[in-house]
Image (cartoon, rainbow, N blue to C red):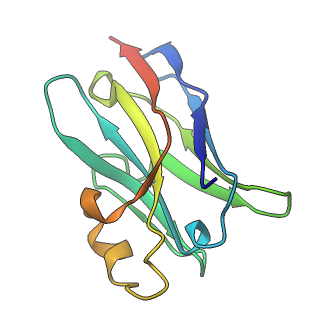
Amino acid sequence: DKIMQASGGGSVQEGGSLRLSCEAVDYTYSVYCIAWFRQAPGKGREAVARIKDDQTTKYSDSVKGRFTLARDYTKATLTLDLEMKDLKAEDTAVYYCAADPQAPWFPERCDSLSEGDFAYWGQGTQVNVSP
C-alpha cells in the first residue's frame, strides 16, 4: 500500500523546461526523506535532489541552479514536484522518485543518498532533451 507514482516526463529541446510530479499514497514515513534519482542510458542511477521533513533540500552539482523541488502534503497524498529549467542533452534519463522509510531512525542517510537505502520507488518517467 506504500505506492509512489511519477509522471510528467516528455521531450524538449535544450533550454526548455519540464515539471515532474511524484505522489506518495502512504507518506507516513516517506515525508522524512524523499528524492528524485535518474538513470541515463548506459549509466548507473544517480541522485538528483532530495527534501527532508524539515524542508531542507539538496541538489547534485549537475542540476544545482536549474532544478527546484516543491513538496506539498496538504492533500491526502504527499506530492513532490521537480521543476526542471534550462534543460541540457545530458539531462536525458529515466527519472525516479524514491523515499527512505527508515529515515526517521537514520536521518544521515538522507544526506548520503545511497540508492540502496531507498525502499520505495516510483515506476520512472522518461525525459528526453534534444540538442
Q: Is residue 33 left or right of residue 53?
A: left
Q: Is residue 96 left or right of residue 92?
A: right
Percent position of residue 45, x then y: 24, 42
Q: Residue at x 46, y 53 (%)?
A: 98
Residue 53 quadrant? bottom right
Which residue is situated farthest in the right direction here? 75
Which residue is situated farthest in the front direction here? 1
Viewer can see residue 14: no
Percent position of residue 50, x then y: 45, 62
Q: Is residue 88 left or right of residue 68?
A: left
Query: Which residue is more in the foreground, 124 or 17?
Result: 124
Quarter of the picture holding the C terminus: top left
Query: Which residue is more in the foreground, 105 or 92?
Result: 105
Viewer can see residue 68: yes
Q: Residue at x 58, y 73 (%)?
A: 29
Q: Residue at x 54, y 24 (%)?
A: 9
Tally of numbered discs: 0
Which residue is situated farthest in the left direction here? 42
